[in-house]
Image (cartoon, rainbow, N blue to C red):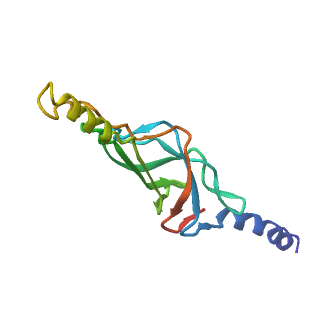
Amino acid sequence: MKKLLLLACLLPSFMSNFAQTTLKSSSIVSLRFAEEVKSNSNAANVVVANDVKVGDKIIISAGTPVQTQVTGTKRRGCGRAGVLNVAFVSTRATDGTLVNLMGGSISREGKNKKGLAIGLGVGLGVFAWPFLACLAVKGGEAVIPEGTLTTNVLTANEVTIK
């Protein structure tokens, strides 16, 4: 009888070790840029800003790196500005499971200086080859500053961890 009572008392604690926790699809994940990103960058250093929890269990830890896809164009002549787009692809759960991300990207555009370029081209075109001066004027570079937070990112798949 004592063994049966002991087993009944210990069974719930053993079962909790084997319990699984599921993070549902479309759960919100907050992200933070760990360094500044410019329109001529090939990569963005982005991390999870806050722990993602289900109940008291942490599924994705704060500081976990995020896989990103950076597309952008460098600033060009004739006053055209640089353009930057960062899409968030995936991160990892605490047990190493891949967590795909969806629905969040950040886009920035630098300062457009087309008016200045055209004005210089026309004004200096009298003295130099016409419109050659407009090629020397470049638009502003697109920048996402360090510490920028985004909360419009969701998980794309269900994640079950032990």
- Residue, far top: 127
Visible residue check, residue 156: yes
Q: Is residue 154 above or below residue 107?
A: below
* Image-quadrant location for residue 5: bottom right
* Image-quadrant location for residue 43: top left
Tell me which residue sits at (27%, 36%) in the image.
119
- Residue 112 at x, y percent in the picture: 36, 42
- Residue 8 at x, y percent in the picture: 81, 72
Q: Is residue 143 above or below residue 48?
A: above
Q: Nearer the viewer, residue 97 or 82?
A: 82
> In which quadrant is the N terminus drawn?
bottom right
Q: Is residue 46 above or below residue 159?
A: above
- Residue 61 at x, y percent in the picture: 60, 50
> In which quadrant is the C terminus drawn?
bottom right
Q: Nearer the viewer, residue 22 or 37?
A: 37
Q: Nearer the viewer, residue 13 or 134?
A: 134
Q: Nearer the viewer, residue 82 or 13?
A: 82
Q: Is residue 22 above or below residue 34?
A: below
- Give the side of residue 155 with respect to residue 9, left or right: left
- Residue 27 at x, y percent in the picture: 58, 65
Visible residue check, residue 94: no
* Image-quadrant location for residue 105: bottom left
- Give the side of residue 102 with respect to residue 125, left or right: right
- Residue, far right: 2
